[in-house]
């Protein structure tokens, strides 16, 4: 499986590709380094995101997961950049319960590109995050998106 690792403000990230789609984004350096056109495009889009030049991604994604997980991940992609939803709100949109949504959220193999960091706990509590430095990484990503939108003049 081709992988491409690169440095970001959150440390080294590794993108993995299979059958012409991104299947994973992991923290740390990957073993099988191979630059493919898709991995280069994905790296460039992620770098643009961290540089405040992009708020969404235009990449083929194919995360491995159950039908329910796929449904949750599709709902995550519908949350606009700079916004958050609670686990309960997300669960209501797909006809599920918050705990099941949380489990699917934690299993997301393509964080950032599938924005699981935009889901927060009840009462606005930040909640956890499985990547990088946990909640601090989640806060960083949410703040980055809000700063980017303010700079673009789309968030007051």
Image (cartoon, rainbow, N blue to C red):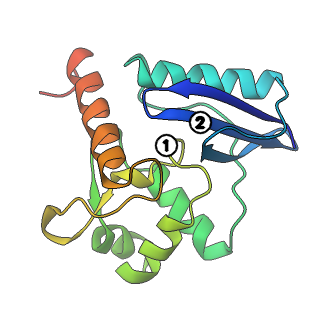
From what the image shows, is residue 155 above or below residue 66?
Answer: above
Q: Secondary structure at mark 1?
A: loop
Q: What's the residue at 27%, 52% (across, down)?
A: 84
Q: Name which quarter of the figure residue 124 lies in.
A: bottom left
As drawn, 99 above or below 36: below
| Residue, disc 1 | 112
Residue 65 in percent (x, y) is at 69, 68
Q: Are marks 1 and 2 in contact (CB under 8 Å)?
A: yes
Vertical relation: 75 (above or below) 154: below
Q: Is residue 97 visible?
A: no
Q: Nearer the viewer, mark 1 or mark 2?
A: 2
Indicate the position of residue 108 as horizontal and vertical percent values. 56, 60
Q: Residues within 10 Å of mark 1 (few under 14, many from 20)?
A: some
- SS state under label 2: strand
| Neighbourhood count class around disc 2 (C-alpha, 10 Å): few under 14, some 14–19, many 20 upward | many
Left or right of residue 10, residue 37 in this image: right
Q: Quadrant of the N terminus?
A: top right
Total count of labels: 2
- Tag 2 residue: 13
């Amino acid at each position: 499986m081709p992988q491409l690792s690169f440095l970001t403000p959150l440390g080294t990230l590794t993108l993995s590709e299979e059958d012409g789609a991104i299947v994973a984004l992991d923290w740390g350096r990957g073993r099988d380094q191979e630059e493919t056109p898709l991995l280069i495009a994905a790296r460039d889009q992620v770098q643009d995101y961290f540089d405040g030049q992009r708020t969404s991604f235009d990449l083929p994604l194919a995360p491995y997961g159950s039908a329910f997980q796929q449904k949750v991940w599709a709902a995550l992609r519908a949350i606009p950049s700079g916004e958050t939803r609670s686990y309960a709100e997300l669960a209501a949109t797909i006809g599920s319960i918050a705990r099941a949504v949380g489990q699917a959220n934690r299993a997301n193999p393509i964080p950032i590109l599938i924005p699981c960091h935009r889901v927060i706990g009840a009462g606005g509590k930040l909640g956890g995050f499985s990547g990088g430095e946990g909640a601090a990484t989640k806060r960083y990503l949410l703040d980055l998106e809000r700063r980017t939108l303010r700079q673009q003049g789309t968030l007051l």
